[in-house]
Amino acid sequence: MRRYEISEDQWEAIKDKLPCQPGYQGKNADNRLFINAVMFVAKCGIPWRDLPERFGNWNTVYVRFRRWAKAGVWQKLFKDLADKDVRMLLIDSTVIRVHQHAAGALKKQGNRQAK
């Protein structure tokens, strides 16, 4: 198993919840390969265009991702896999890094900071 790919146990948990097109033989017909491609983009934070070729054409993967999003496939999958005891999850980030040049912008007409 490569880095950022779902495990066998994870695949078993979701494979029957994913839409499929019987008889479809396209390059990205394999749902597991497609899920791995989406996970790779999400975890690496790369643009779709930088998706490695082993996942197929980046545009085909992106179009399929959008089609599933519009059809509610992702929401249904997340809802089905969600822990039933967790009602709300909040994520907090108290560290926000700013580019070094953003810390001291040039002043055109005196001090414009709030007083």
Image (cartoon, rainbow, N blue to C red):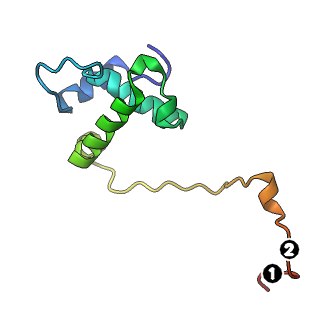
Q: Secondary structure at mark 1?
A: loop
Q: Residue furthest right?
A: 110
Q: Quadrant of residue 109?
A: bottom right
* Depicted 24 relative to depicted 105: above or below: above
Against 9, is 39 above or below?
below
Residue at 80% of width from left, 61% of height from top?
103
- Taking depth in this image into account, of 41 and 108 the one nearest to the observer is 108
| Residue 45 x/y as whole percent | 54, 38
Residue at image mark 1:
112
Q: Are marks 1 and 2 in contact (CB under 8 Å)?
A: yes
Q: Is 20 placed above or below 108 here?
A: above
Q: Quadrant of residue 73?
A: top left
Between disc 1 and disc 2, the foreground one is 2
Give the quadrant of the C terminus: bottom right
Query: Badge 1, how many Cα within 10 Å: few under 14, some, many 20+?
Result: few
* Amino acid tagged 2: Lys
- Which residue, given by chain and number where applicable, does mark 2 sit on? 107
Secondary structure under the numbered disc 2 in the rendered image: loop
Q: Residue furthest left?
A: 22
Which quadrant would the N terminus be assigned to in this image? top left
Question: Where residue 44 sits: x, y (%)?
Answer: 54, 33
Residue 54 picture location, percent across and down: 43, 16
Q: Is residue 74 visible?
A: no
31 displayed left or right of 102 = left
Does residue 35 appear in the picture of this structure? Answer: yes
Give the residue displayed 52% in from the left and 30% down from the top. Answer: 50
